[in-house]
Amino acid sequence: MDAPRGMADKAMLRTLRGDQPSRPPIWLMRQAGRYLPEYRATRAEAGSFLDLCYNPDLATEVTLQPIRRFGFDAAILFADILLVPQALGQKLWFVEGEGPRLEPVESREDLGRLKRTEDIHETLEPVYETVRRLSGALPRETTLIGFAGAPWTVATYMVAGRGGLDQAPARKWLYSESEGFAKLIDLLTEATIAYLLRQIEAGAEVVKVFDSWAGALAPDQFQKYAVEPARRITVAIKAIHPDVPVIGFPRGAGAGYAGFAKATGVDAVALDTSVPEEWARDALQSDSAVQGNLDPILLITGGDALVRRAERLIEILGDGPYIFNLGHGITPEADPAHVETLVRTVKG
Ligand code: CP3
């Protein structure tokens, strides 16, 4: 089979296809963000975070900023997982210094007021336009990643109306009226598939599904609401685009990481900070590539501890398919100089 154009030059794509470049590719979750002065300037120009997400000019600019500065091997589309509920008709806003707020969806009646999957694209069209522009603007060695939130994680925000510590509102609904809750997960699974397919048609070369709150699910619920939707999304994407790799991120899944790639068909699993690297090598890397899992706090503190930890991850995981990344998103307090040191360490 012929390799798609440009693939041979892209370390990230090669790793996801089971090949082994001479060093692991590197990118960082939330690499475009408030730790960069140029991001803060563009965000101020946009007016608000959501205005930035829906402005293809400025969203393209902030996606490219960390690529220019650090030469990462992949760029991730600048957007947010909560744009999907907004496109489904749920009211969304961000409170400065606090985070997202949504008008809660708490019952089957509330579900009935949401739009249908085929109607989400009207709102999301500027996001697809950003992907098209990025596809033409990135250096040829840089891979473009599209993304969406996983149905369970998006549902936790939709039901609570905000971020929280324990995802209790969604968990209460799941136990008290599981049929209604399953309908919400079904709707989000369909919308996520439609959204990711459009991103791929616009030029995304890899897609990542963020299940940031997978760790809040009990084991049987994890199968039903994290594994099964991830499997449906992966199967639906591969039915149309068999060569587009999918990265799953069941953050906090613990023992649930074992077998996740096999059960879902994802090409890579992103590891949170708590997953031991020796265990990941022995238990996961034969099933799929792994990505992760440096503690983002080390990008605030820096120094020898940062370099030693990065070297250790490469030593243990670098003999198999491995993508260097953090275990969770970079924080606004991260020092760009430490990011620079990290990139030099991984590329060196
Ligand atoms: O650089 C990138 O990684 C691409 C863009 C991206 C953002 N959010 C931009 C963003 C991605 C991939 C996300 C994913 C996302 N969004 C997740 C899953 C990953 C994770 O971190 O667990 C979640 C849970 C969200 C929802 C969300 N968006 C929250 C809870 C918040 C507020 C918390 C915070 O960090 O401020 C956001 C806002 C957000 N999304 C920012 C950015 C750059 C900060 C907004 C700002 O500029 O004020």
Image (spheres, grey):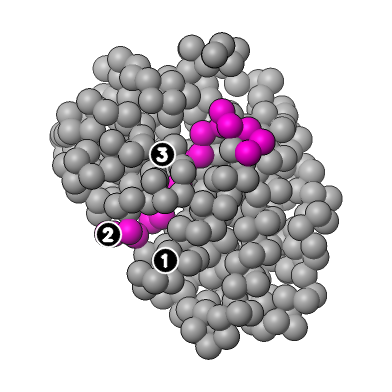
Which quarter of the image is occupied by the C terminus? top left
Mark 2 / mark 3, whichever is N-terminal = 2
Residue 130 location in percent, x, y?
A: 71, 35
Residue of label 2: 255
Describe the element under mark 2 as helix, strand or loop: helix
Residue 222: numbered disc = 1
- Residue 215 seen anywhere in this rendered image of the structure: yes
Type of amino acid at the residue the image marks with label 2? Ala
Residue 99 location in percent, x, y?
A: 55, 64
Q: CA–CA distance between discs 1 and 2?
A: 11 Å
Residue 163 location in percent, x, y?
A: 51, 69
Residue of label 3: 268
In-image side of 102 versus 302 (left or right): right
- Asked if the residue at tag 3 contacts the one at tag 1, i.e. Cβ–Cβ closer than 8 Å, the answer is no
Mark 2 surroundings within 10 Å by alpha-carbon count, few (fewer than 14), some (14 through 19), many (20 or more): few
In depth, the one of 190 and 106 nearer the eye is 190
